[in-house]
C-alpha cells in the first residue's frame, strides 16, 4: 500500500485541531468576552491556550487522548501495522485515571512484550526502508 493511499491518522487530526484551537480560539475569543468581576478576558484566553497546550503535550509525549480518538487510532494503526513496522505488533487501548481519556499500548505479538511507542517508531519503522 502506497503512503498516498492511506488516510491521516486520527491522532494527527486531533493534535492538529488542538494546535489550531490553541492559536486561533484565544485570538477570536478575546474581543467578545465581557469584562467580568471574577475573570478577565485575558485570563480566559490564556486559560484556553494553556488547556490546549497541555492536551497537545499529553497526546504527543505520553500518547494520552480522549477515548474516541485512541480507539480510532488503535484501529487505524492495527490496519496499517504490517506496512509500517518490521515486527508484528497489535495496538491496544487502556484507560487512564482520568475518565474519558485513554492511552495506546503496543504489544509485540511474537514475544508478547509491551513496546513504548517511540521505541517502535524509531527502532522498528519501515519508513525509509524499502524491501
Image (spheres, grey):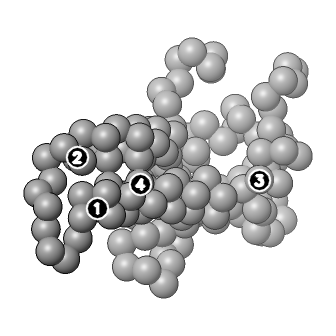
Q: Earlier in the sequence, mark 2 or mark 1?
A: 2
Q: Earlier in the sequence, mark 1 or mark 4?
A: 1
In this figure, which residue is indicated by the disc labeled 2? 29
For residue 55, say whether it is visible. no
In this figure, which residue is indicated by the disc labeled 4? 49
Q: Where residue 118 is drawn, which disc sits there?
A: 3
Q: Where residue 53 is drawn, which disc sits there?
A: none
Q: Between marks 4 and 2, how big is the CA–CA gap?
A: 11 Å
The answer to whether marks 2 and 1 mark residues whose Cβ atoms lie closer than 8 Å is: yes
Q: Secondary structure at mark 3?
A: helix
Q: Earlier in the sequence, mark 3 or mark 2?
A: 2
Left or right: residue 91 versus residue 72 is: right
Q: Between marks 3 and 2, how big is the CA–CA gap?
A: 36 Å
Q: Earlier in the sequence, mark 3 or mark 1?
A: 1
In this figure, which residue is indicated by the disc labeled 1? 44
What residue is at 41 percent from the left and 40 percent from the top?
Answer: 23
Residue 47 or residue 115, whichever sits in front: 47
Q: Does 105 sit above or below residue 10?
A: below
Q: Does 32 sit above or below residue 101?
A: above
Q: Quadrant of residue 106?
A: bottom right
Residue 5, how many percent across, how many down?
53, 17
Q: Between marks 3 and 4, how big is the CA–CA gap?
A: 26 Å
Q: Secondary structure at mark 2?
A: helix
Left or right: residue 33 versus residue 54 is: left
Amino acid at each position: 500500500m502506497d503512503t498516498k493511499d492511506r488516510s491521516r491518522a486520527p491522532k494527527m487530526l486531533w493534535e492538529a485541531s488542538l494546535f489550531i484551537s490553541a492559536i486561533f480560539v484565544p485570538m477570536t475569543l478575546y474581543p467578545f468576552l465581557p469584562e467580568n468581576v471574577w475573570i478577565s478576558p485575558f485570563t480566559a484566553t490564556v486559560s484556553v491556550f494553556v488547556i490546549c497546550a497541555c492536551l497537545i503535550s499529553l497526546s504527543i509525549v505520553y500518547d494520552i487522548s480522549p477515548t474516541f480518538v485512541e480507539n480510532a487510532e488503535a484501529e487505524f494503526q492495527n490496519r496499517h501495522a504490517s506496512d509500517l513496522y518490521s515486527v508484528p505488533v497489535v495496538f491496544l487501548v487502556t484507560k487512564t485515571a482520568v475518565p474519558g481519556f485513554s492511552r495506546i499500548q503496543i504489544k509485540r505479538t511474537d514475544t508478547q512484550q509491551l513496546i513504548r511507542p517511540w521505541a517502535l517508531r524509531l527502532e522498528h519503522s519501515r519508513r525509509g526502508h524499502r524491501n
